[in-house]
Image (cartoon, grey):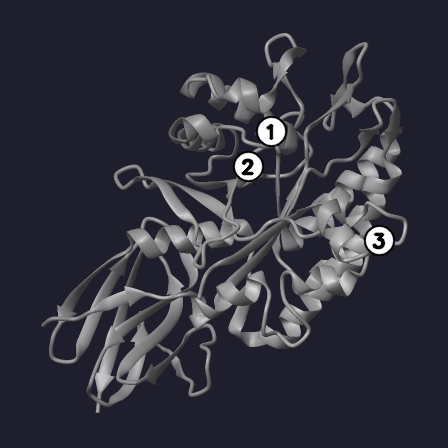
Amino acid sequence: MTLEIKSELPMLKVPISLIVDDWSVGYVERGEEFEYKRTHEFLLDFLRLGNMNVRGKLSLIPCIVKLNKLNHKLLGRIDEGISGIPREILERVLDLVRREATKYFDITPEMLTHSLAVDIDTNELLNETEWEWSQRQNLNSLTRYIAKALSILRNVGIIATGVTSPCDFGREVEGIYARATLEAEKLINNIKLTWYFLHVEKYRSYVTPRLMYFDENNEEAVVSIISCSKDYLGKSELDKASGDPYKLADNWITADGKKGRLVELYKNRSYLVFHTHWWNVHRDEDKVGFRALVETISRINKLLGDNVVWMKCSDIARYFAVSKVFKWKVVNEEDTSVIFESPFICKNFTISIESKRPIKHIKVDERPLRRVKNHPLIPNSWKVINGKVYACFDLSRTVRLDIKFE
């Protein structure tokens, strides 16, 4: 029996995710003044997005560095204390990240400092940036460096399922970087399916993640999560929009939902991962960047609504990896029984099967799926569109799907 079975987008919805880079518990302003109140204020505002159903990724830089012309100083690590932040305030912010932010967002290191590289054996700052340093490293040295960043987050109770590249960290040695991320995750968090954020595609009309590494025997994989647009909250865009948050939002999605970078990609059924930086969201006292971001999300939820699904980056990485590596085989040709196999479990895995015969019911591991008629699907459901069957179910290591025809 010849069947054509394909993976589809989850529940036939377009995945969407918000990435926010560069955040940590504090920062050094203008090379001298240390500031932590604004980063805390940003976090409180940012958590409001979770209540708008937003999912995505937030960076938490493990170490804070003070840079100026005379000297550079490592002010501390979030697990040991930061010079300039009272311990009780540091603990309060980290507790907020653990209790609230992790509900909605993956929390990742943006390596150790997002500035100068660190000699992890001596804890001394090196006289070059992390991204410069990374381009001439081998698998062992990159693994140790990434593992150090992951371990600091783990020490404060945060399991990072992936990492974020500061600037172009690892770009010139990306194959090694991908493997180093996996080896570091296995070492620190016992994670065998991981991801990283490095690339931005500003102009292509269709953008997806990339499966950068897969070892079938050891059941390991690494996915590159790619942003589909520039950061439209930057100063140049702010100047073009004359500080109008609604005009800033137009770059992503207009008020009528007809134009904007996200709309263009949505029409092409592209993954909608987009990014900004915390300091663009909270640059000005009037929070014009944050207001623009809230407006963007409100338009997405109102105009795209049930046709998109907000997902953490880790969930997008998992879904994309499974869609590329799952296997299937027909075991009963009288009706249609198919065994699906995957090295990774996956929620709301969605497939399509060509079928010209009327269907009575579909079961997954003897549990019936619900037939729906309206687009799109819901968890554990199926429907028929133009002679093609679409089914959504949770995929474990081995799943049996049975189609009973009328």
Q: Observer-nearest residue: 86 or 276? A: 276
Frontmost of labels 3 and 2 is 3
> Which residue carries the number 2 mark?
163
Give how far apart the Cα atoms at labels 3 and 2 are: 28 Å
Residue 194 seen in the figure: yes
| Side of 141 where 287 appears, left or right | right
Q: Quadrant of residue 380?
A: bottom left
> Which residue carries the number 1 mark?
111
- Label 2 neighbour load within 10 Å: few <14, some 14-19, many 20+: many
> Which residue carries the number 3 mark?
287
Q: Amino acid at mark 1?
A: Met
Q: Amino acid at mark 2?
A: Val
| Side of 110 where 147 appears, left or right | left
Give how far apart the Cα atoms at labels 3 and 1 are: 27 Å
Helix, strand or loop at disc 3? Answer: loop
Give how far apart the Cα atoms at labels 1 and 2 are: 7 Å
Q: Is residue 123 above or below residue 274?
A: above
Q: Are marks 1 and 2 in contact (CB under 8 Å)?
A: yes
| Side of 122 where 225 appears, left or right | left
Q: Observer-nearest residue: 402 or 184? A: 184
N-terminal of the two: label 3 or label 2? 2
Residue extending farthest top: 122
Q: Amino acid at mark 3?
A: Lys
- Label 1 neighbour load within 10 Å: few <14, some 14-19, many 20+: many
Helix, strand or loop at disc 2? Answer: strand
Q: Are marks 3 and 1 in contact (CB under 8 Å)?
A: no
Frontmost of labels 3 and 1 is 3
Q: Observer-nearest residue: 385 or 86? A: 385
x and y, in percent, of residue 176 in the image:
40, 26
Residue extending farthest front: 240
